[in-house]
Amino acid sequence: MTAKHTVLPLAALLVSGVAPAQNKQKPNLVFVLIDDFGWGGFALNKSMYDYSQLNQEFIKLRVTDYTPEQAQAAAELAIPTLSQLCLGGTRFTNAYTSANVSSPSRAGIMTSRYQERFGYYINGEQVGRGVPLTETFMPKYIHDVGYATACIGKFHLSPNVKDDEGGCADGYNPLDRGFDYYWGFNAAGTDYYGSKILHKGREKVAATGYSTDEFTREAVDFISRSQGKPFMIYLAYNAVHGPLGLPAPPQYLDRFKYDSRLLNNFYAYLYAVDQGVARIIDKLRETGQLDNTMIVFTSDNGAPGGAADVLPKNGPLRGFKGQTWQGGIRVPMFFYVPGQKGGLVSDNIVSNMDIFPTFMDWAGIPLPKNIDGKSLLPIISGKSTAPVRDELVWMGQMAENWGMYGIRDQKVAPGGFMVRKGDRVLRYDIVARQFTLYDLTNDIGEKNDISAAEPAKVEEMKAIFRKWYGEMKPPMSWKPALWKGVEFWDSSSNYQPPTDANSAPREKGEKRKNRQKE
């Protein structure tokens, strides 16, 4: 499917949408989640920074055969459909994930709660524990009012199963947690060709093609099967998570003609997602459902800094996946809602925890009272610009594992926390026992610590974290030695780094280039 075929009809549809109130059927809901995609890599954010603000260390280390300008052009070329959807909806420029790595971020999405409330802080919590069965997934509320619900793609929320790689433990399968249909895998990542961990429901299935296309196929087929019944699709592509070494299929790769094989292939993987969304839109149009379907797009965390990744990555933001710098947790997000005014851009501080509450609000489904997520419908509808919350808080690893140097510290990286309130960000380094404060309005790259100039603001935000921390549960499996130091008020909880924390070996050559699976 070519861009000419998909973009022009879509542009026409965006100006002729019909509000859901004009349909007798409840509105449909489509959630498109991609993996490891940075805020700066979403081309429509390019007006918010310039090339001089990109990560110069990454450029020096990794960029050899393309220019930042070429990378930005490729980023635009890769998302014609997503750009049209976004321009027809509301783009959130201050959107955050609830965690800096995949599994806890998805736990925040599914429960619309700070996942720390149930002890879920790092990817390691998934391996042996998973999201506790005492937690209700938001799709269950949607399912219980008559929706057909599908989970397609990467799940990564069940405990691992010893004899079934990619499978889900009893009671933890998406079919047990509010979904009618499941086709995907339960792991951090998988091969794009020939994956051996795909499951349909509770049984393994063989891969038959490129995984992005397979996930799209399943979403399109689910729409076809759901005629006469409202549906909700959670479509979690594994793109652009590694491994990215093999070439994308020609119908995607041939769109990019730069001298850099790396640049061409990365954005071909992204373009495959874009064209998957185009095929979903075609099916919605064919079935008369496009004017009755809300679509949201976002990423599970920021971009990593490995050799397989390319500019613009996290744009001007400091840090990478696995870190609580902005680059690890600030992501692209937009909602397309038929019948609502398009072209809106909001700087409201929002979270991936807000997605399902927004879905449910639009569909007229009552929200549970114990969630941290907020409905963004007043902003999307243009009825309000008021802040939906006063602050957001994060606690997790501060790891180099997904950074630029191949340091394997996932199991020994120390913890840390971050608080954002207004345009200020406070973070705490438990190794140095040091607070730093940044003004994101004038210092989006978090380079200039202003804590000495604003001691009252530091104390205010320290109090926010301490109160928040008191409401959370301790990590389920994260070693206390790695996180207890966040209790800055307790002098007995000093962080003592493990002997190997700062001496993990760096990977070299092709191993480092291709290593993206963790």
Image (cartoon, rainbow, N blue to C red):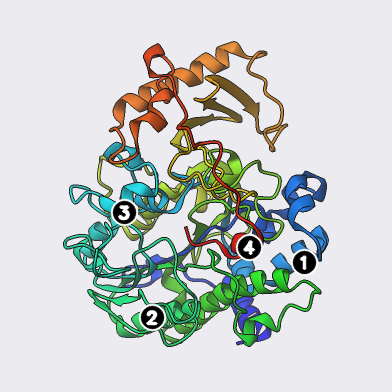
Which residue is pictured at 47% across the width and 86% down the height? 209
What whole-number distance in Å separates the C-alpha atoms at marks 1 and 2?
31 Å
Label 3–label 2 contact, CB within 8 A: no
Closest to the camera, between mark 1 and mark 3, is: 3
Measured as percent of width and height from the top left, residue 235 is found at 42, 69
Residue holding disc 2:
218
- Which badge, 3 or 4, comes first in the chain's sequence? 3
Is residue 38 left or right of 490 when viewed as pictured? right
Which quadrant of the structure image shows residue 146? bottom left
> 212 or 359, which is in the foreground?
212
Other-residue count near label 4 (Cα within 10 Å), few / some / many at <14 / 14–19 / ≥20? some
Q: Nearer the viewer, residue 260 or 10?
A: 260
Labelled disc at residue 127:
3
Q: CA distance from mark 3 to mark 4?
A: 25 Å
Q: Which residue is mark 1?
A: 73
First in sequence, mark 4 or 1: give its number: 1
**Secondary structure found at label 1:** helix
Q: Which disc, if any, is residue 513?
A: 4
Of badges 3 and 2, the one in the foreground is: 3
Q: Amino acid at mark 1?
A: Ala
Residue at 30% x, 28% y is 471
Q: What is the secondary structure assignment of the residue under circle 4?
A: helix
